[in-house]
Amino acid sequence: MSRLRIAALLISAALLLLLVPSLGAPAKVNLLTAHFDRDCVFLGGSLKVGAYSLPFFGYVSNSTRKLYYVDAPGFVTGSYATNGSGVFVGTVFLEGAPSILVAEVEPRGEPRVYALRSAVPLYGVDVVSLGNGTLFVAGYVYAEATTRSSDVVVVRLSKGTPVRVVVFGSPSFDDHPRRILYAGGYLVVVGETWAYNVSQGDVFVARLTPQLELKDDTVVGGAGIDTPEDALPLDDGSLLLVGSTVGGDGTHDGFVARVSEVGGLLYLSSITGYGEEYAVAVTRVGGAYVVVAYGGFEEDTSGALILNYTLRGAWDLAFQGAYLVKASNSSVLPVKAPWGAREAVFKTDGEVFEVFSGREVCLSNNCSLREVVLAEYGKQVSAMLSPIYGWRTLHGVMKARATPEVEALALDYRGALLNASTSSLEVFIQPYARRFDPVKETIKFLERNIPILLFLPMVAAAVIVTLQIKRR
């Protein structure tokens, strides 16, 4: 028996002890994707057990709570759920070689778990389903050993079998997808490329037919490093993009961009706070376009922020307001939801919740979160929004690349009861109230007035000497 297999068996034994509620606390869950679908919540990410991270996926409902994991290092990064079933995509390392992990989960039956393997390294990122067992998986591949650069790979699956594969990218530069979606009869892949401005990252948008033929592509970006995180198609065919950009000061700022169907830049704005800021998700709720961001929107602390936008006419994307997401005594982090899910998902230590429905899943034994406050922050955020200048668009950057052979390999998996429960949250909207901390304010005053404090003894000494001279 190989050392790798022995290690896997030991990890499995440890997980069985850790995951069953009656035997102990759950293993450390790193939640990377979640979706609140009807009465079922789909969860995916990685399980941290000692020095190992194992890919996990599962679901929680009022009657069932099940978790599955693979006995190999890896992680789940993307998901898609519809009609009560879910699909998870990530990366699994089989004998040290990365392969794309795919798991199709049906709460009424056993999951179908398999790896998409090739002679070259494959990494899975995101997935979208067109129904009837047809899946499109997006990832990246290191197909050309001479350049050692990554290209985008999209695999079309029919009931678990690869039927078509396409690889495209910029010559000799890294390309990484972030999101795949379906709109206007085309697959849309959004990601990051380093080919537009040499040694700098920019955003690419590529459209493919369902037969995986590359129709067109647009690259947009400026002189900094621009990384997309999510995208949302609008009714007029344009695309709303969110992500982060690194400017001249070396810190990340969030960005919101709107690109037309023909590749023109219609709107571009930055979200700049007190430190590092990232726009990580975008969705549509009613007539509003909701952007979820994370970063230093308050001094000396980081938190989650919801921004609302609307379309005025055909061209004007207008900012309407913003809310800080506050949970009692817990930091709040955004969680990636599937494309098309009209939800904003967040997590705290041991809990994951969706603000618009007020639904929550507890992943620990000590869940105390009972309410979430959306603090009105539009006045403060409006001062943090500013136009970005210098971004340009370019077309025809992506080219078809060599396509490797890809095969599906069924994987063994293990199941365990997930120590989780569902409940409802109270979500309140309140005016923002700045908390006054005398200790922090004193430290801040001292830091900001160091030059004055340094010269103050000299000024005091001069005054004393002057007074002494006058007395004489």
Image (cartoon, helix red, strand yellow):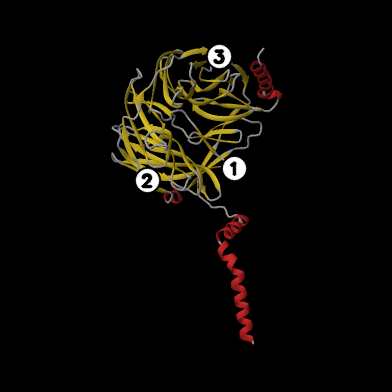
Q: Is residue 143 above or below residue 346?
A: above
Instruction: Please name whichever residue, 87 or 50, is drawn nearer the observer in this view of the structure.
Output: 50
Mark 1 and mark 3 in contact? Answer it, CB < 8 Å. no
Mark 3 and mark 2 in contact? Answer it, CB < 8 Å. no
Q: Which residue is mark 3?
A: 411
Which residue is rendered at x = 58% and y = 26% of the image? Answer: 46
Which residue is rendered at x = 32% and y = 35% of the image? Answer: 394
Residue 320 in the image: state x and y as whole percent: 39, 45
Number of numbered tags placed on the structure image: 3
Please tell me whether mark 2 sits on a helix, a strand or a loop: loop
Q: Identify the image quadrant of residue 418.
A: top right
Instruction: Please name whichever residue, 144 or 221, is drawn nearer the observer in this view of the structure.
Output: 144
Instruction: Please name whichever residue, 154 or 110, is drawn nearer the observer in this view of the structure.
Output: 154
Please tell me whether mark 1 sits on a helix, a strand or a loop: loop
Residue 384 in the image: state x and y as whole percent: 43, 49
N-terminal of the two: label 1 or label 3? Answer: 1
Seen as rendered, the residue at the extreme front is 146
N-terminal of the two: label 1 or label 2? Answer: 1
N-terminal of the two: label 3 or label 2? Answer: 2
Q: Amino acid at mark 3?
A: Leu
Q: Quadrant location of the N terminus?
A: top right
Residue 31, label in figure: none
Q: Identify the image quadrant of residue 246.
A: top left
Binning the other alpha carbons within 10 Å of mark 3 as few (below 14), some (14 to 19) or many (20 upward) gives: some
Q: Amino acid at mark 2?
A: Ile
Residue 301 in the image: state x and y as whole percent: 56, 47
Q: Which residue is mark 1?
A: 328
Q: Which residue is mark 2?
A: 388
Binning the other alpha carbons within 10 Å of mark 2 as few (below 14), some (14 to 19) or many (20 upward) gives: some
Residue 229 in the image: state x and y as whole percent: 44, 34
